Image: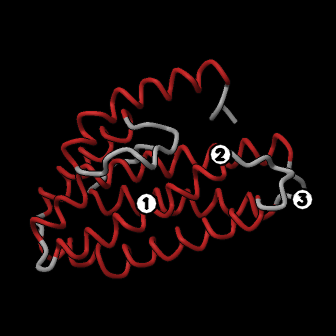
Amino acid sequence: MGHGGNVIDELTTDHREVEEMFARIQAMTGGGQQLRDAVDDVTIELVRHSVAEEQYLYPAVREHIEGGDRLADKELADHGRVEKLLKMLENTRTDDPQMSPLLQQLMDEVAAHVQDEENNLFPMLRRACTAEQLDDLGDKIRRAKAMAPTRPHPAAPDTPAASKLLAPGVGLVDRARDSVTGRGKS
């Protein structure tokens, strides 16, 4: 969850971790609790990552990159689609025939988003920001992930101000629920 380094290093490491989680899910031969635990783990990671990006990365994109509003809006739309898929997966039994297609759709959406960020957005950000700005953003991203919700909330506002205000409280409730149920302990 917190790896250290500048914002690009932090988020790229998150991307690799999610790819590893997807590979483990694809390698599973059955469903049941093992699949539910794996889906919960990837959900937790993706929600934390998304909230942190929405709070700090995309405002920086808007501020520092020419055409940043358009880029940030596109990334937020990607997040919206992923969050809706995560909510559907959360409500889908592992033996439901829709589980596999939903998982594949999630993996495809996330892969496209990762590729876009790493090939386009991150290089532009690296050119537009100083090393100190990138380091500061990395610190902010790590703090945001630590306080972020762990469950999808597709109806929650994705503006930075609203997210910074609401996410810690929602995150606290999510982590309390996770603690009681044992979710995310695999």
Q: Marks 3 and 2, Cα distance to the nearest angstrom?
A: 20 Å
| 87 or 129: nearer the viewer | 87
In the rendered view, how is the structure colored?
secondary structure
| Kind of element beneath mark 3 | loop
| Kind of element beneath mark 1 | helix
In the figure, is residue 124 to the left or right of 31? left
N-term-proximal mark, 1 vs 2:
1
Residue 99: horizontal and vertical position, in percent?
76, 58
Residue 158: horizontal and vertical position, in percent?
30, 51
Please give the label number shown on residue 80.
1
Q: Locate the C terminus by quadrant.
A: top right
Q: Which residue is mark 3?
A: 29
| 85 or 45: nearer the viewer | 85
Type of amino acid under label 3: Thr
Quadrant location of residue 117?
bottom left
Q: Which residue is mark 2?
A: 90
| 158 or 143: nearer the viewer | 158
Residue 15: horizontal and vertical position, in percent?
48, 62
**In the rendered image, the vertical position of residue 179 relative to residue 60, given as above or below:** above
**In the rendered image, the vertical position of residue 55 relative to residue 183, given as above or below:** below
In the figure, is residue 146 to the left or right of 136? right
Badge nearest the viewer, 1 or 3: 1
Q: Marks 1 and 3, Cα distance to the nearest angstrom?
A: 30 Å
The residue at the point 45 percent across, 49 percent down is 154
| 101 or 172: nearer the viewer | 101
**In the rendered image, the vertical position of residue 17 relative to residue 168, given as above or below:** below
